[in-house]
Amino acid sequence: MTDYIVFTGGNYDNGIKGIEQYLPERLAASGNKVVSIEYPRFRNLLFALTDGYRRIEGSRNLIKIRSVGLPFGRKIPSINRFNHMLNWTVISKLVKIDKPSVISFTPEYSYIQHLINPRKLIYYVTDNYFSLPFWRNFHSELKRLEQRVLAISDRIITVSPVLVRYFSQNHPRVTLFRNPVDLSELIISSKNIKSKKRLASGIKKVGFIGGLYEWKIDKKLILQLLSNYPGISFVFAGIWQLNENRLTHQILSKPNFKYTGFIDNKYLGRFIYECDACIIPYKSDSWGKSAFPAKIYQFLYFGKPVVTTELPSLAYLGKRNLIYYASDYDLFIRFLGLALNEKKGDKYNSRRYEAVRNSWPVRLKKLMTIIN
């Protein structure tokens, strides 16, 4: 018997774990029977034709289903609908499902809502989906799908005040819940820290971790930071998806720009610990105004001063003087100077406390209360 079905709206294993991956795991760890279903991908269909491909992966309480599909699903609505209906028809025969609670991170659930009889439907919104590149040519269909899923949802959970205001116009039960952080992956023993030499000894280091996507990262800001602080090492870690254009080449030409590539979670703690300050240089556009970067808690766990662009979801941390909240480029540049010269004091413990109180063990009970 399945307690929860989670529609992730994307890959389960995409390198950088988000709430879509953590939530099924936490629900399962709490003793619930959970089925997590990926977005139907043509790549999975190709893999399914090769030896050793496992479409269904299961543990004690969690089953991960790697949905297959025809290509161009998010460009051609009829294909998208066919993919979702086909996968659900197969899944419902493979997995025993009877009146589960459904948590969907995608409005595409409405394609198959008539085939499922859920006990409860939670629509969980982590972004302004209209601003994401893979929805860019699909706005009319996205709007139609979202209107349908809003009409049948018991509750909306979202990560930013901007999205709360938006969805509250069309739904009576909208809850703000900022994504928790998994601190277990950041724990480093004091013995291990002391046994390692500081990287780039004598040179201060500013760090960023996360996806380096063209639609997400403010490259103009990064170039200004590199130019204004030539003696500071700026180290970026994550998935590289920046376009090859003039701005990108200018950034790469700066000697104080460093790119490490993707860093495994078990090394993130080491990376953050060795930073003198951290930055979140996101664009403050329609996506940025709705985004909540959970990495903020990873930075705060180590007491690091963080400078961020004007992201409304982080404004509350700026008001409490736990981060530097910059409304423009000039402020960001000035705040970074303050952050780099900050001395370890009262803010260190306050930042760590904020991170711990937003960790999964602390916040899971609150999330379960919202869901149930």
Image: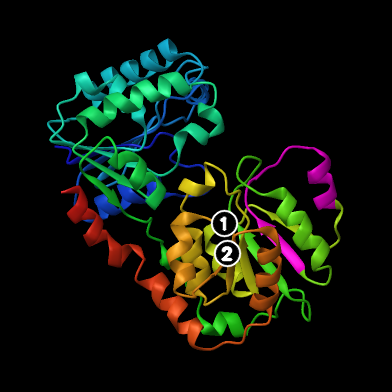
Front-most of 150 and 18?
A: 150
Q: Secondary structure at mark 1?
A: loop
- Vertical arrangement, residue 121 with respect to residue 252, above or below: above
The amino acid sitting under disc 2 is Tyr
Asked if disc 1 and disc 2 are in contact, CB closer than 8 Å, the reply is yes
- Label 1: which residue? 264
Is residue 186 in view from this perspective? no
Q: Is residue 128 left or right of residue 125?
A: right
On screen, residue 95 above or below 159: above
Residue at horizontal 45 percent and vertical 83 percent from the top:
349
The residue sitting at 37% across, 56% down in the picture is 178
Q: Residue at x 25, y 51 (%)?
A: 27
The residue tagged 2 is 267
Mark 2, residues whose alpha carbon is within 10 Å: few (<14), some, or many (≥20)? few
Dot label at residue 138: none
Q: How far apart in space, not on screen, are marks 1 and 2 (Cα)?
A: 6 Å
What span is colored magenta in the figure?
233-252
| Above or below, comparing residue 307 to residue 49 in the picture | below
- Residue 57's spot in the image, x, y percent? 36, 37
Point out residue 83 in the picture as x, y percentages from the top left corner.
39, 17
- The secondary element bearing badge 2 is classed as helix
* In magenta segment, residue 250: yes
